Image: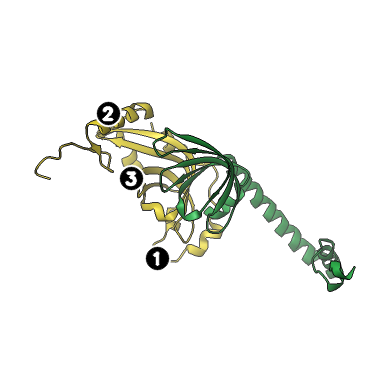
Chain colours: A yellow, B green
């Protein structure tokens, strides 16, 4: 069962000083406050966390953050606590569909961090791990 | 609480910074500014591959090189305390202005060394 999903932070963000960003009819991060979001960084890392705050540069504050490492159909969640992410490093941010998140075990198996790092190390010997976490074999097949 | 304000509240706390080049710094935050430039003390620098370690007693990091910062949970407690203190001060100030006389408010300001006079300048002592 997802630890980070059930551990919704007890303290909610006080949206009072962020209401300056609230523009009716406009899309902004304001709607994503206190929601579970997936943040993909430019270096290929994926973080799940509760969005607590943001600013005009899209610097983010995430609570109960978890880094998800994925290889093939295995994944591991590494708890990381409170994160302040500098906006320019964010590739995308999206709200997590909690229902779909609960069903993640159907298509993928959860393993421990240690195991997945072993797999990643082994894979890096034989081939290259693409940023999406899938194995790219070496030599690259001709069709690519 | 804005991200930079959260970091400001974290001064004095140990934090972990990862830079864009992949190096991580575990250190105590001494101070920071609007551009996320930081000065840190007692840092442990870890190389990108996690194999090399350095101890760096004093460190200055330029804000634009930072990828992300991990902050300990106790900072949330500090933020809450500051918020409560700020609200308390606001309540006190409104009570004082509505209830108390103007003179007492002025006296309070001067007591805290509010307005400085030319006569107070050391040259004139």
Pinpoint the chain carrying mark 1. Answer: A
Tag shown at residue A26: 1
In the displayed structure image, the side of residue B9 where residue A27 appears, left or right: left
Residue B94 screen position, x and y as percent: 74, 63
- Of badges 2 and 3, nearer the viewer stands 2
Q: Name the residue located 75 percent from the left edge and 58 percent from the top edge.
A: B92
Calculate the distance from the C-alpha at mark 1 to the C-alpha at mark 2.
47 Å
Q: Which quadrant of the structure image shows residue A87?
A: bottom left
Mark 1: which secondary structure?
loop
Pinpoint the chain carrying mark 3. Answer: A
Calculate the distance from the C-alpha at mark 2 to the C-alpha at mark 3.
19 Å
N-term-proximal mark, 2 vs 3 = 3
Tag shown at residue B108: none
Neighbor class of circle 1 (other Cα within 10 Å; few <14, some 14-19, many 20+) is few
Q: Is residue A31 above or below residue B22?
A: below
Q: Which residue is mark 3?
A: A44
- Of badges 1 and 2, nearer the viewer stands 2
Q: Which quadrant would the N terminus of chain A be assigned to in this image?
A: top left
* Residue A101 visible in the current orientation: yes
- Of badges 3 and 1, nearer the viewer stands 3
Residue B72 versus residue A17: which sits nearer the camera? B72
In the displayed structure image, the side of residue B30 where residue B101 appears, left or right: right
Tag shown at residue A122: 2
Pinpoint the chain carrying mark 2. Answer: A
Q: Are marks 1 and 2 on the same chain?
A: yes
Q: Are marks 3 and 1 on the same chain?
A: yes
Residue A140 screen position, x and y as percent: 15, 40
Mark 2: which secondary structure?
helix
> How many numbered marks appear?
3
């Amino acid at each position: 069962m997802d630890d980070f999903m059930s551990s919704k932070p007890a303290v909610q963000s006080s949206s009072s000083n962020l209401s300056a960003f609230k523009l009716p009819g406009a899309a902004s991060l304001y709607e994503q406050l206190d929601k579970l979001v997936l943040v993909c960084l430019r270096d290929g890392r994926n973080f799940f966390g509760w969005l607590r705050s943001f600013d005009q540069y899209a610097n983010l504050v995430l609570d109960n953050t978890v880094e998800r490492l994925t290889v093939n159909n295995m994944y591991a969640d590494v708890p990381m606590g409170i994160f302040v992410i500098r906006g320019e490093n964010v590739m995308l941010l999206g709200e997590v569909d909690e229902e779909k998140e609960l069903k993640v075990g159907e298509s993928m198996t959860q393993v421990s961090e240690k195991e997945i790092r072993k797999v990643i190390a082994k894979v890096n010997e034989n081939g290259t791990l693409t940023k999406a976490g899938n194995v790219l074999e070496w030599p690259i097949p001709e069709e690519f | 609480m804005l991200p930079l304000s959260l970091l400001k509240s974290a001064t004095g706390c140990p934090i972990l910074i990862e830079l864009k080049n992949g190096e991580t710094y575990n250190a105590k935050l001494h101070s920071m500014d609007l551009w996320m430039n930081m000065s840190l003390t007692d840092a442990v620098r870890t190389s990108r591959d996690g194999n090399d370690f350095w101890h760096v007693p004093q460190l200055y990091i330029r804000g634009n090189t930072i990828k992300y910062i991990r902050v300990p949970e106790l900072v949330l407690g500090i933020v809450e305390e500051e918020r409560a203190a700020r609200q308390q001060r606001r309540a006190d100030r409104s009570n004082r202005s509505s209830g108390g006389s103007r003179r007492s408010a002025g006296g309070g300001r001067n007591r805290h060394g509010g307005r400085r006079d030319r006569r107070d300048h050391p040259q004139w002592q």
